[in-house]
Image (cartoon, coloured by chain):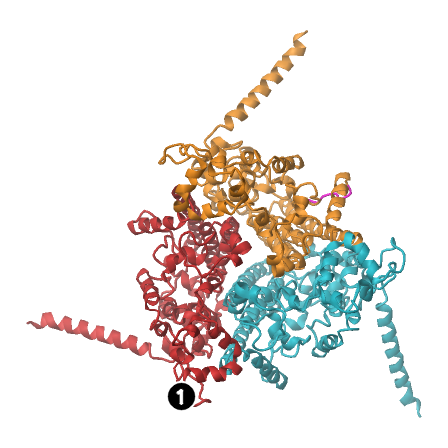
Chain colours: A orange, B cyan, C red
Amino acid sequence: MKPVVWIPVLIALAVLLAGFGYVGWSKSGPGAGLYSRLWQPDTVFSYWNPKPFYKSVQTVEGLFKGEECIECHESLTPGIVKDWRASKHAKQEKPVYCSSCHGSDHQSLHMPTPDICANCHKAQHDQFLDERRYGFPSHALAMERALDSKHFADKPKAEVASCLQCHSVATKCDSCHTRHRFDAAEARRPEACITCHSGPPHPDDEAYFASAHGKKYLTEGDKWDWSKALVKGNYPAPTCAYCHMRNGKHQVADKAIWKFGLKEINQHKGENVVKRQSWIAVCMDCHKQTESEKWLRNLDLERKRAWQKLYKAEDVLEALRGDGHLSPAAGKRPHYPIEWIDKLWPRARIGLLEGQASAFYNVSKIERDYFEMWYFANLRAYKGAAHGAPKLVDEGHKRMREALKDIKAEAQILDRLGKKEVGMGKPFDPKPLWTTGEYTSKNAEAN
Amino acid sequence: MKPVVWIPVLIALAVLLAGFGYVGWSKSGPGAGLYSRLWQPDTVFSYWNPKPFYKSVQTVEGLFKGEECIECHESLTPGIVKDWRASKHAKQEKPVYCSSCHGSDHQSLHMPTPDICANCHKAQHDQFLDERRYGFPSHALAMERALDSKHFADKPKAEVASCLQCHSVATKCDSCHTRHRFDAAEARRPEACITCHSGPPHPDDEAYFASAHGKKYLTEGDKWDWSKALVKGNYPAPTCAYCHMRNGKHQVADKAIWKFGLKEINQHKGENVVKRQSWIAVCMDCHKQTESEKWLRNLDLERKRAWQKLYKAEDVLEALRGDGHLSPAAGKRPHYPIEWIDKLWPRARIGLLEGQASAFYNVSKIERDYFEMWYFANLRAYKGAAHGAPKLVDEGHKRMREALKDIKAEAQILDRLGKKEVGMGKPFDPKPLWTTGEYTSKNAEAN
Amino acid sequence: MKPVVWIPVLIALAVLLAGFGYVGWSKSGPGAGLYSRLWQPDTVFSYWNPKPFYKSVQTVEGLFKGEECIECHESLTPGIVKDWRASKHAKQEKPVYCSSCHGSDHQSLHMPTPDICANCHKAQHDQFLDERRYGFPSHALAMERALDSKHFADKPKAEVASCLQCHSVATKCDSCHTRHRFDAAEARRPEACITCHSGPPHPDDEAYFASAHGKKYLTEGDKWDWSKALVKGNYPAPTCAYCHMRNGKHQVADKAIWKFGLKEINQHKGENVVKRQSWIAVCMDCHKQTESEKWLRNLDLERKRAWQKLYKAEDVLEALRGDGHLSPAAGKRPHYPIEWIDKLWPRARIGLLEGQASAFYNVSKIERDYFEMWYFANLRAYKGAAHGAPKLVDEGHKRMREALKDIKAEAQILDRLGKKEVGMGKPFDPKPLWTTGEYTSKNAEAN
């Protein structure tokens, strides 16, 4: 074989190996994920992401059997022992004791991560992992995608600790099945979901409870028999889990036609047509097919309308950038510490493709305003339309209209000021005010 | 008779007839209401306004008896059959079957509109219709007033579908009595009302639950006997229906002293004095007369205070318009497609008389900000004061103070910029930015 | 003794006496508190602050025994009689009748103030009063601190009536123990607290119910046995009262480590170290010590991060003031009527030390925006972090980021406009627009 053939092959191999090596090295820092070398976890992280961070206390020594754990903890922490006694775990012929999940050596106890629960609950765990096939957002990918995102690594850890609290759904089963009763009846109720699915940008809580379904649950849900499976005919009105985890399937991604609502999605694509049929099958547990289709079409129309407004706002921002009146322009404000490429090639953040995920910080007011419109107002309307909650649809569109009006008025003032200043030969330099952002290289150093 | 007499009479008659003819023609379009020729309904409209829009499915043929409906739907849609079995309808000697309300011919089924329910529930329906005497807002007029309003016809239908969802209270009884149990006990609970009475501009939900009355309901309401009538002594705390539909009367307009809160109302007018006495009679089911009067007076004072702030804001806007610095001024932005008169005679939207209902869109930021202050902040404070919820009063007045501050600061910047530009002989033309609004003639064409 | 000694002593005595005299005179006006001569109470004030303002009705004459009260009120106000019959008061061998608390003479009835309840419930009342030692905020000082604050006296009474509704916790026990059942079981539930602890600036309601603790309460709280004392092992999840009034202690101030969240607090001070240990002892009813410490440390870090943002915003405002571009500057807007010293020595309101409590009104937009950031966004994040509600932490920090961005953008526009105007020799005078504020001397006259 001639060198012309194997030299490039060898180079490619070397680059590949170097890449793997670099990623491996990068992941082995004090934090976790792709940028683990750039940050340190706060102590509470051990709670949300126990595998890399949890350390057992060293003050109690010894190996303990299940009955012994109970004996001490009955008086130390009576609440959790009571909960456990009320659980199915306790009522087995061979009870599932504390030690079954936490280990026996009190100096190397561990938190039960999903793979530990999978020892007994394999089917559910497999379904859960199956979500990964559908990409993010998904429960199964929630932790790693959070840790691997640039703005997570960039920000002070005190600020992103609350992110992990919900993203820990990927690393702990007790996000939904609260310990130590782990009662399926509890996990079937909406409250199990809405500790996280609540507030901007995913007001599922507000949307469900504002719907006729949710009102029915609020009025009489306490009297329903929650020990029943989530199948047709068992419940007078649906809950989060009824529709999204029908028949108890621990995988919620395979019917998501509009996904998170972050971009316009072509509903005519084959996979979306199939997903839609799955949705309609759920609705048809209670409603007619024709009515179910109407409601989904209503959602489509709402989405189309929302995107008309969003594109309009993007146009205004792009025109402003084109005229050089965006202030501070991309080059005049601090770049994202982790994105060194931004230092060389500063860019505005307008629309999904220009890196909206990082529009959270270190951008101009008008870019941020668009981000708010897109990420919060838009998603409020979406969740409302998807869950049959007119209140949220109205609020979302009202906020989008307001945002568009604000963006136009702001563009107008920036334009008027900018023209005058250029006309007077004294272009304004916003840099001094923005030199030190909230999230600067200095933050990164102390991260 | 001389021609001088009958010629004008004939002309008047001809004009009247032409008027009637025009309205009739205008109402016979594909949409509904006064502007029915200007828009098409989305499919989901058949749900909210069944009379003009509902079409029965054609896939099932045949005439069916009540028992036969049940037989099939028991497995097709078991939930609603269960609900029906639990209803009074099912428990009559001669049950009220599906076919009693929907018809027997499966290819021409209809949705039960209020007039159908009135076949058995005449008294309630009569009370309901009686609301029309008191003008809008009212439940009985909710649908037609929505359809007849210009901004409804003007807007893309995807955006106003959510309006109809609540305004359908006029066209379907199951807004409050959820199908197919139609249980009065359920309709007596606040959840029956707040699917709609919630969120801006009518946060009755938030107000009631933030009050001491609402907290009592939340704590112990599940244990009250909801099968009891809404009369004195039956309930430990009031609910929406207890006060507004006392003794079960299906008419809520005859005690409304501040109505929707949209304008300042003279409380000394005879009719309002009478209404006030009716209110106090309700309070006196539990409270002393003197205390009841104090609370209502407290509401009056809150209202007076709110209007002081609103008038102040109107003054600022009017001064700005007077100085020619409102930007974009009325003539520089798209007019409302349906209001052709706006094209000839453009006007700003400041205060109730200048057409606030349409300040939802195609106005300047500062007009919109006033609209928000009036329609959302003001009504939040009002609902809080009316329901004994200090949280909402505080929030409402806080938002009004903020809005007034924003409006002043905005006016100041527009004024400063405007003066400078005029001084430099280069008045600013905002028109290019605003030429195409969110709701333009183009939208109207595709509506 | 020489005159040089006793003359200054006499003068000091005279000044002291004059001071006492002045305060006494000042407190004896038609209102209440330090500024009682500057305002009149609205009638509803008699409800919230009965001692100075309540007047018995004169229409019923006579002395009545307890049984006689019941006899009449059974039909007049059956609800409250039912409640009383269900109370412990009614079930004593010697019942505590209406007259025991309200008096017997129907023309001089009184509302039962806490000192009256203390006749039987001395221990609770003593604990309650003990809160005063810890300073404000506290329940026991709630009324007098409200009445003695300048902005309360300054504002129209219709606007501050809602303040008193909650601050009446100091003057009436039925804020928490709703009349006339006064059931401890009811007062143990969160609903007893959140009529007041709700909404900005203290969204304890939202925070608790958004936490895993709150969700557990929502799901199954109705089935817990609320007659049990608030001690270890009695409840599956904590409520407001469980943690803040553990063992039923009517004093909530002795564990408050971050207090109201209004300033950065040194957690290393001795008293705070002791308080922290008390907190952790509460958590340890259910959780491990190490985990409890992590959560509190997480709160500390969140607080530190919040203050970084707040200080940054203060810097921007101070720079703007330094450059003379704050508009309207302190001297160009109405001063607070009651603070005559402001007329002589006008000052901007930036940060806690410059009088933030009065930044509610008569300030520039940018000062107000900082106030919002500090008082509402900041406290939302704080309450979220303190109660384990990630939703509120996210929302709070999101709003702080937005506010900081807005403040910078606003500062930039004021700076650009200001520079231009000075350059052109025509400094802008904002005074005309602001001369009459919302709260001016005119308001004070009609107060």
Is A133 in the magenta?
Answer: no
Nearest the viewer among B316 and A285 is A285
Q: Residue at x 47, y 49 (%)?
A: C388
Q: Residue furthest left?
A: C1
Type of amino acid under label 1? Leu
Q: What span is colored magenta in the figure?
A: A263-268
Tell me where residue B403 sits by quadrant.
bottom right
Q: Measuring from the top left, give residue C422's x and y in whole percent.
A: 48, 56
Badge 1 is on which residue?
C63
Q: Measuring from the top left, give residue B64's x and y in whole percent.
A: 87, 60
Kindly state the secondary structure of the residue where label 1 is placed. loop
> Quick one: quadrant of the C terminus of chain C?
bottom left
Q: Badge 1 sits on which subunit? A: C
Inspect this view and state whether residue A302 appears: yes
Nearest the viewer among C6 and A84 is A84
Main SS, magenta residues? loop
Left or right of A50? Residue B77 is: right
